[in-house]
Image (tube, coloured by chain):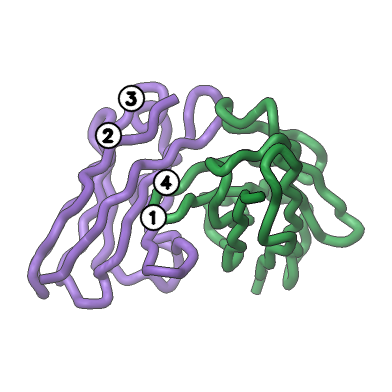
Chain colours: A purple, B green
Amino acid sequence: QSALTQPASVSGSPGQSITISCTGTSSDVGGYIYVSWYQQHPGKAPKLMIYEVSNRPSGVSNRFSGSKSGNTASLTISGLQAEDEADYYCSSYTSRSTVLFGGGTKLTVL
Amino acid sequence: QVQLQESGPGLVKPSETLSLTCTVSGGSISSYYWSWIRQPPGKGLEWIGYFYYSGSTNYNPSLKSRVTLSVDTSKNQFSLKLSSVTAADTAVYYCVRAEAFDIWGQGTMVTVSS
């Protein structure tokens, strides 16, 4: 099973909005609501930001939002802040009852 | 709140078995799925497998032949064994609560080298 496809990098200026895509197939992203997003700062463990496509865990800023269309899920960060600079990963449950991660996207806040 | 802590050797020789334990504190290991996830240096996340406390398991097909997950409910711990390791298994290993991977341990670096 191949990893989900994410752009290697995205960038934006403070205050702007950016969107990170996560493309899979009908056997994973397109077939299930179990798509999640994680933020990872250098040397730290990943942190859950979005689960079940568009739900935010308690304590996560409402500047983070998730959506899905077909086989592609998206993470949008609005009102970019310097602290948002990190690596972002998507994950999806699959038809084989396994889990796939995306390759990760490095977000740079200019 | 629930916290996870990985423990085990930081250095394993090639062809040997990597063994890690995750201790769950602040909550019961029962009633949840639990996972191991790893991250090679400078690379992305790789799901290793998950299990339910009652014994149900599922593994990454690419690692399935070498992985064993087990649980000790009396100690509130679960474990990972990865056999026949090579340098490609060098990574930070995380234990994670598999409810959308909402709770992570701090991770433990394991290096495979002679």
**Residue depth check, mark 1 versus mark 2: number of the one nearer the observer:** 1
- Please name the residue shown 58% across and 26% down the image: B61
| Structural distance between the alpha carbons of marks 1 and 3 | 26 Å
Task: Give the label, 4 or 3, closer to the camera.
Answer: 3
Mark 2 packing: few (<14 Cα in 10 Å), some, or many (20+)?
many
The structure residue drawn at horizontal position 42% and vertical position 41%, both measured from the top left corner, is A101
Tell me: A90 left or right of A5. right
Q: Nearer the viewer, mark 4 or mark 2?
A: 2
Q: Nearer the viewer, mark 4 or mark 1?
A: 1
Using the image, tell me which numbered label, if any, was put on residue B42.
1
Identity of the residue drawn at 10% across and 71% down: A110
Point out the residue furthest to the right here.
Answer: B74
Q: Identify which residue, B19 or B33, lies in the foreground.
A: B19
Graded by Cα atoms within 10 Å as few (under 14), some (14 to 19) or many (20 or more), the crowding at tag 1 reads few
- Tell me the number on the disc at residue A25: 3
The lab-note entry on whether marks 1 and 3 share a chain reads no
Q: Amino acid at mark 1?
A: Gly
Kind of residue indicated by mark 3: Thr
On residue A23, the disc is 2
Q: Of helix, strand and loop, which one carries label 2?
A: strand
Whether labels 4 and 1 belong to a single chain: the reply is no
Q: Which residue lies under the disc numbered 4?
A: A52
Residue A41: give its label: none
Tell me whether the residue at label 1 lies in contact with that at label 2, contact meaning CB atoms closer than 8 angstroms.
Answer: no
The N terminus of chain A, quarter of image: top left
